[in-house]
Image (tube, rainbow, N blue to C red):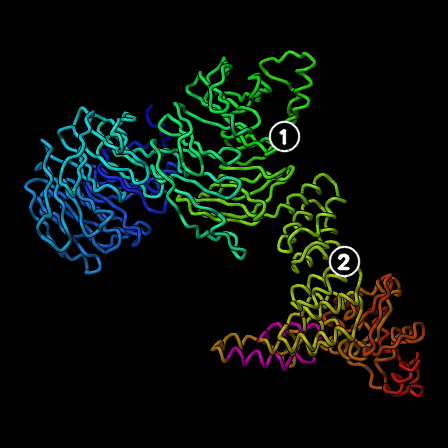
Amino acid sequence: MGMRLEIKRKLFARSDRVKCVDFHPTEPWLLASLYNGNVYIWNYETQALVKTFEVTDVPVRAAKFIARKNWLITGSDDMQIRVFNYNTHEKVTTFEAHPDYIRCIAVHPTQPFVLTGSDDMTVKLWDWEKGWKNIQIFEGHTHYVMNINFNPKDSNTFASACLDRTIKVWSLGSAVANFTLEGHEKGVNWVEYYHGGEKPYLVSAADDKLVKIWDYQNKTCVQTLEGHTQNAAFACFHPGLPIIISGSEDGTVKIWHSNTYRLENTLNYGLERAWTIAYQKGNNNVAFGYDEGAVCVKLGREEPAVSMDNSGKIIWAKHNEIQTANIKAGHDDNIKDGDRLPLPVKDLGSCEIYPQTLQHSPNGRFVVVCGDGEYIIYTALAWRNKGFGNGLEFVWALDSNEYAVRESTTKIKLYKNFKERPNSLKLNFTAEGIYGGTLLGVKSSSFLNLYDWETCSVVRRIDVIPKSVHWSDIGDLVTIACEDTFYVLRFNRQAYTQFIESGGEVSDEGVEQAFEFVTEISESIKTGTWVGDCFIYTNAVNRLNYLVGAQTFTISHFDTNMYLLGYIPKDNRIYLADKDVNVYSYALSLTVIEYQTAILRNDLETAEQLLPTVPAEQRNRIARFLESQDLKELALEVSTDIEHKFELAVQLNKLDVAVEIAREADTEAKWKTVGDSALSDWKFSLAEECLKKAKDLSGLLLLYTSSGNAKGIRELAESAATDGKNNVAFACYLQLGQVEDCIEILIKTDRIPEAAMFARTYLPSQVSKIVKLWKENLEKQNKKKAAEALADPADYENLFPDFKHALIAEELSKKTRNISIPATSYAEYKDSLDQDIIAEIKEKYPDGVLPSNLSPLHNRLVNSIAAKKNVNGDMDDEVSVDDDRDNMSLLSMEVNTTGTGSVRGDVDFDDAASFATSEHERPGENLVSEEKEMEELVQS
């Protein structure tokens, strides 16, 4: 039977005639040069045209990426070589390389060299590090040079194909060809090397419609491939698959087996003549250029043919060679997650068919190899042939002596002890795939049937289209992976058996009670395996996850595709391989899985017993899991990560634990977090300690102003001023009524205009001084007109209405600013907020001058406060606030001297006009000095 080669189209882009295509080595880009003079770059993952270069108005017959320089290079019929930066579209250089059409370009894999071939019958070598100097010319062909390619095994040599019907092999540094291969009857269009080390082969395509394979050591033609009906335009060996790909002007692309030279497949995309090909090393993408566009396809599977048994023995295929390694040989107790294992590789043997899949039997004694429509069963140790046959797919039962083979879409054979069973499966639908395990799964175009291995009767029909089916070791759980979702079901064999024994009739749908739904996860699975009740898998976005119950957890992220090999319980590690069978491992403790399973089953007692057996390095994973299950108290006990413990302590409001951690770590961020939590919990002493250590001046300002802590505000003002936190310092001084310090901060921070405005409102006696500073500052900036426009109230009293009355208000404010009023008196004084103090002073003293024999302290406000409340106005004593929040301290007594009352309501003037009493109310002979009266007021 022929090779089973899956072909998936990734890009189908119509355009003008495509003469050359090339893949970018890292980006998902396909470069195409067109006959109309343009160069396109398509994203073959999104099918989007991402870049366009209008190179010239004549055909561009050659174009290549030079990815290490972020360049693309083109050769065209105007004889020019052009180099562009494909990121910026900048033209790096352009020069005339040949006196005739440029047909082909080859970029050296490591050196700064480029080869160009032309209709002038020469090949030229260019060095871009020497300013694109032509360092060698290769002459010897007698017609157009159509194609050139470097030898991947020796980049010092290259081959050229020419319409003179010959292929020449050259060495850099030598102007004469090493040798010439002759055999085609017409012009040769293409030549390429075989990539493997075992065959010294070249492949060529010519206008005689033939593809030839050459041994360049013996200089002989070893095979001729016939099948194209028009000129053969290209032919190449695929770098990873055992195939030769050829294309022709007959519009077809043919795929040949490189070992048997058998034609395996023919592709025709209806885009007329095929001209060119490109492939990607490291993956299976291949692109073709046609008259009417470009196509990109993916050939086969990138997943390696590899399998690992339960003991850690790995077997894989490298082409037809079978190799093996043992995890034990590379195991190191100190190995880190994600490190590549240094495994010694041994050759186990070879395989008669090209292996597409390898699979150990459940007991590890046998390995089945599938490929080319056949299967062969080998013994795992000696690699001896145990059985073989034709088959599209092969699957093992849970018992290693049983297996099934899908020979066609209508025929599935069952075997036991390597002998075919007489009661093979009878199907009334087309079988598109089979799956092994506890039950035999058969996929149709719209559903999955699960059959009993012994009786071949249907157990259950499930209306999904699976990509893979994974059974647990004991056979009670199954994962059915679909395109973008996977389902976990529980198989109840007892319920199925009871139904059968009770004489129940099994319909095409099977037995409903046989399965119960467990969970559905919206992820696309690549590879997976069960470990007990835990399902480990890799997904389409390159993550290694595991599922316990209905919860998924991520173990690691990958930069490339990784394939799960299995889990070895004694190592507590998961093993994976990349496409080149480099093996990596990640830790996952079995006790962790058992613990999580117990928690999900709400079996806290079992979980508590398992906890001591969980490795210390896995405790944090357990803690995160417990947190996700909203078991934060338990997570706090389990976690060993200081950061996580701190987060949990704050969430649980266990501030004593959080404070202890904050003291150990002593970071401002942690102190601030605890401080905020303490504030929310009304623990002001703790909040103050935390905010101080966090240097959270804004938080302290909020705390002190809310609690009326005058001493704290004063200390905070000094600290903020020292640290240059001018906004906080300003707010503190304003709260304290120390407006002089506020003005000093504004002047120091070069906010002189703001200082003048502030002084006009709160400290009018300082306005003249500040206006002078303002003028001087403007003059330094050569803003003389602006300086001249400023008016000083001392000189222009007419421009500042009520300025002299504001001075009286300022004097009164200074004498009363340090008197505090308890919060309990708020209702009594709150109406004073609406008073117009300036208006009342003007009414009493219209000329703005107080009588000389009166004291501004003789006002009803001061007398009433002193007489009724017996309040100590000394601001040096902190005002304490109880937890009931029923007190408020009015910390400042500054007056808004513009006539709008107190700015914050901290000063309550019942009657501003009585700040100074009249002579008939209080005879002058009864007056006492201001100092004495203030002293008596404080003492009272």
For the residues labelled 2 and 1, the Cα–Cα distance comes to: 43 Å
Q: Which mark is residue 864?
A: none
Which secondary structure is most common in the magenta stretch? helix
Residue 85 x, y percent position in the rendering: 29, 52
| Mark 2 vs 1: CB contact within 8 A | no
Q: Position of residue 521 (x, y in %)?
A: 59, 35
In the displayed structure, would residue 561 be above or below residue 431? below
Q: Is residue 771 left or right of residue 939?
A: left
Along the viewing direction, whichever of 932 and 553 lies nearer the viewer: 553
Residue, disc 2: 654
Residue 746 is covered by the magenta coloring = no
Q: Is residue 764 visible?
A: no
Q: Is residue 350 above or below residue 667?
A: above
Residue at 45% over, 52% down: 340
**Where residue 108 appears, x then y in whole percent?**
23, 51
Using the image as rendered, state which of residue 590 and residue 345 is in the foreground.
345
In the rendered image, residue 514, in percent from the top left (x then y), is placed at 65, 22
Label number found at residue 476? 1
Closer to us: 825 or 690? 690
